[in-house]
Image (tube, grey):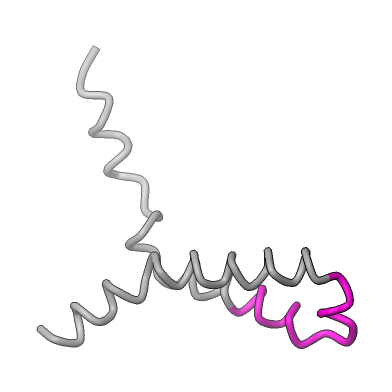
Amino acid sequence: MGNPWKKTYLIPGGVFDSSSLKDEVHRLEEITSQSGFWDNHEKAENTMAAIKRVKARYEPWETLVAEL
């Protein structure tokens, strides 16, 4: 049957795909700049939390790489 993890490791993405993660942050930040963004407080808070979560996935890696 083979190693099920081998195929997974060949698929790029996840925490190491900082380009896609940055694109997602950029997309979310564009939403925050729209007029009336804070009119729906719950949606705004969810969007801000999503930005924080996505940044937390790539910023530590960028810091580590910068220190090397």
Q: Position of residue 32 (x, y in %)?
A: 73, 81
| Drawn side of residue 3 relative to residue 26, left or right | left
- Quarter residue 28 falls in: bottom right
Q: Residue furthest left?
A: 68
- The residue drawn where x is 10% and y is 83% is 68
20 lies above or below 4: below
- The residue drawn where x is 71% and y is 82% is 30
Q: Nearer the viewer, residue 13 or 50?
A: 50
- The residue drawn where x is 59% and y is 67% is 49
Specify whether residue 66 is painted magenta. no
**Quarter in which the N terminus is drawn:** top left
Q: Residue furthest front?
A: 41
The part of the chain drawn in magenta is 26-40
1 lies above or below 13: above
Q: Position of residue 41 (x, y in %)?
A: 80, 71
Specify whether residue 32 is painted magenta. yes
| Drawn side of residue 24 relative to residue 40, left or right | left
- The residue drawn where x is 89% and y is 82% is 36
Q: Nearer the viewer, residue 36 or 66?
A: 36
Q: Nearer the viewer, residue 63 or 18?
A: 63
| Drawn side of residue 11 relative to residue 36, left or right | left
Q: Position of residue 21 (x, y in %)?
A: 48, 68
- Quarter residue 65 falls in: bottom left
